[in-house]
Structure formats: structure tokens, C-alpha cells
Image (cartoon, rainbow, N blue to C red):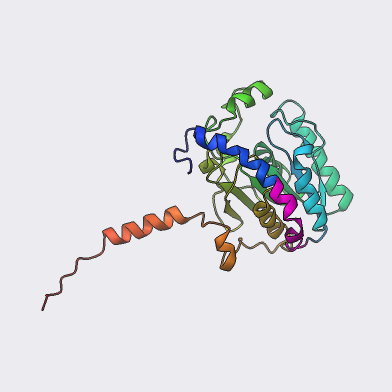
Amino acid sequence: MTSTDPATPPSRELLLLEARAIAELAAFFSMLPMLRLAPAGDGHPVLVLPGLAASDVSTRPLRAFLADRGYRAHGWKLGRNLGPRPGVEAGMQARLAELHARYERKVSVVGWSLGGVYARELARSAPAQVRSVITLGSPFAGEPRASNAWQLYELASGRRAEDWPERQRMKEPPPVPATAIFSRSDGIVAWQGCLEREGPRSENIEVEGSHSGLGHNPVVLYAIADRLSQPEGHWQPFDRSGLRSLVYPDPKRDAHQLKQQHQQQHQPGDTSWNT
């Protein structure tokens, strides 16, 4: 079951399936020994930004995992994410600058949902301080109300969902390596709006699971570890070949299917004589 209309919120059935996040959290704890087989890091700092109405508490499992893999993982320390209120952007920029100065290294930024929208804009405003960006179910390229949380967003932020400056620019990849992780069964936001425009340094990774569990879904965490473990300046797209293809669906399968259908429709007819 997937959401098919990119301009509307996910269906009620998908929204109800968000309860899977509880099972995904249980899977996180049960699979910790296996997650320790994920690629180890080089110790560079990682800033993790929470989703709408969430705080650093929500990202503790993710940050604990990153710390275990050798990263200097940090929360944003700005309390609950109530949208782009006055002072939030400046607060994130100050947090990024502080981590960059403390470790004297570029900072990778991981953002969950609305936090991912922030992460991409943070990289756009301070590319010299950001090493890479990873978004988790972040609707940076979608319609403002193609979400089951747009009313909560307006209530929390005090602004209309459409009221975001330079919305078209948001759809452009940031000037650093960028990975968008998404789920077609996301019950909160339309998955089509979470896709990065793929290019030499931008990609999409599809996973199966809920929106609310993206920050502790073991499959997501492995992909994050894989992306962060790349040497700085040597970014390569995610390799989903081999056994990984059983866990990570092909995010381009729709395009591949359309291409095959087009080729079949335009194949020349068999003109051989029957004998």
C-alpha cells in the first residue's frame, strides 16, 4: 500500500499504519548487535535535527547509534521543533558554527522530516561548514499541504503551510553531498515530495517503514552509517546491489517500468512467415 497522489496527504490507512513505529523501535533495540556491523565512522561531528513538534529526545536512539559507530553526534539544543519561528534559523546556524569550530571539521547534518528541510537550507547558507546532508522523510519538494501534519504545522508555527520563502529553491539539491531517505508507505507526508533531484552528489534511498519510525528504523540507520562513513571529498552513490537489494527497494523502479512498457509498445511486429 502506497500513496499515489503527490498533491494530497497519505491515505487514512497509511496514517493508521504509523503505529508501526513502536515495532520499529523494538526492532532497533533487538538488532543493536547487528547494527554494530554497520560501517564505522571517522569521528567527524554530526548534527541531528528533530521533526515537527519533536525535540532532541526523539533523536536519542539515532544519536546513540552514531556515537557507537564513532561519530560526535549532537542534538540541536533548541527545544521542541515548532516550525520556523523567529530565532530558530539563527539558533541552528550558531549551533552548526559552534560544532564546526569545536572539532575543526565539517559537520554532517541529519534531519528528520521538517528537520531535514532545515538541514538542506542550513547547508545552503553555510556550505563551508557542512560535509553532507541526510534527510529522513523530509517534504522539501512537495506540495505544502500534501501532509497529514500541515494543520499541526500551522498551529505550532503560527504561519500558513504555503508561507515559506523561496519554496522553489528548496527543490534544488544543496551544494554538498545529499541523500534523501524515504518510504512509499509514509503515513505523514506524500513520499513523492521527499525525493532529491538526483545528480553527481545527490541521491535517493528507499526503505520500507513508517514516517514516525525513520529515526530508529534499523534499515535506515544502516544506510545513514554507510553514507556518513565515506571519506570526505570522495562521495559515491549508495550501492544497493547484492543482498542489499532485498532490503532497499529500487527507488527508480517506476521509471524503469515505464521505459520497459514504452519499449514493448514500440517493438516492431513479427513479420516472419509461418512455415
Residue 164: quarter of image: top right
Residue reaching furthest to the bottom? 275
| Nearer to the camera, 193 or 147 | 147
Horizontal and vertical percent position of residue 102: 89, 49
Query: In the rendered image, which quarter contains the C terminus?
Result: bottom left
Q: State the residue in front, 201 or 46.
A: 46
Q: Any magenta on residue 38?
A: yes
Residue found 56% across the figure and 27% down from its top: 162
Q: Residue at x 15, y 74 (%)?
A: 272
Write down the quadrant of residue 171 in the picture.
Answer: top right
Q: Which residues are magenta?
A: 26-40
Does residue 177 show up?
A: no
Q: Is residue 236 visible?
A: yes
Q: What percent of the width, then of the height, locates residue 197?
A: 54, 49
Q: From what the image shows, is residue 102 above or below residue 9? A: below
Give percent across and percent down for residue 261. 33, 57
Q: Relative to residue 139, is residue 154 depicted above or below?
A: above
> Is 222 contained in the magenta span?
no
